[in-house]
Image (cartoon, helix red, strand yellow):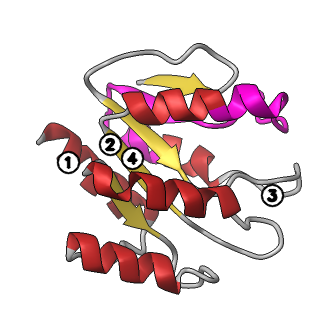
């Protein structure tokens, strides 16, 4: 697996997924993406995984560089996995809402969130309306479904 962090150049490849969702805003909150990487390793994923966080897991640097990296990686990704473990105030994910709406019609999206996620009713509704699927409430199952979509 090639992990492509946002402080690196966007890598290109036919087999690629983007882990979209809220990013912790302080170092007291552990990124959910660490667990996602562990699951992808267990699943023997051998493609690129775009992580919109620094490889050091530090707070982001330059805003414009960050959002341009994300746009390039989202465009390059063959599958966009939205995992939204929204907890207010530590994992709000306001940018995630915009990205979800923007990319929903790309036919690259798989969406999930834990059952205790806050303020996700509209995202659930949109996903069910446009994809005729229920949101996935387990991160590992979401990743498995994303890998299946990638293989198709």
* Alpha-carbon span between mark 3 and mark 2: 26 Å
Is there CB contact under 8 Å for labels 2 and 1? yes
Q: Secondary structure at mark 1?
A: helix
Residue at the spot of label 2: 79
Q: Could you tell which of marks 4 and 3 lies nearer the N-terminus?
A: 3
Number of numbered discs on residues: 4
Q: Which residues are magenta?
A: 39-67
Mark pair 4, 3: CA separation: 23 Å
| In this rendering, position of residue 43 left or right of residue 57 | left
In the image, residue 36 lies at what x, y percent?
50, 48
Q: Which comes before the other along the chain, label 2 or label 1? A: 2
Spot occupied by residue 49 in the image (x, y as percentages of width and height): 45, 32
Looking at the image, can residue 144 be seen?
A: no
Q: Mark number for residue 149?
A: 1
Of residues 2 and 25, the one drawn nearer to the viewer in this rendering? 25
**For residue 78, which quarter of the picture?**
top left
């Amino acid at each position: 697996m090639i992990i492509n962090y946002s402080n690196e150049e966007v890598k290109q490849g036919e087999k690629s997924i983007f882990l979209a969702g809220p990013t912790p805003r302080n170092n007291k909150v552990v990124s959910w993406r660490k667990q996602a990487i562990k699951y992808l390793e267990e699943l023997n994923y051998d493609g690129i995984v775009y992580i919109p966080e620094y490889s050091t897991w530090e707070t982001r640097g330059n805003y414009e560089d960050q959002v341009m990296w994300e746009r390039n990686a989202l465009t390059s990704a063959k599958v966009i996995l939205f995992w939204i473990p929204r907890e207010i105030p530590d994992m709000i994910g306001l940018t995630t809402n915009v990205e979800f709406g923007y990319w929903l019609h790309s036919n690259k999206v798989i969406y999930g969130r834990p059952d205790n996620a806050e303020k996700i009713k509209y995202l659930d509704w949109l996903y069910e309306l446009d994809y005729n699927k229920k949101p996935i409430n387990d991160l590992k199952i979401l990743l498995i479904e994303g890998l299946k979509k990638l293989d198709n």
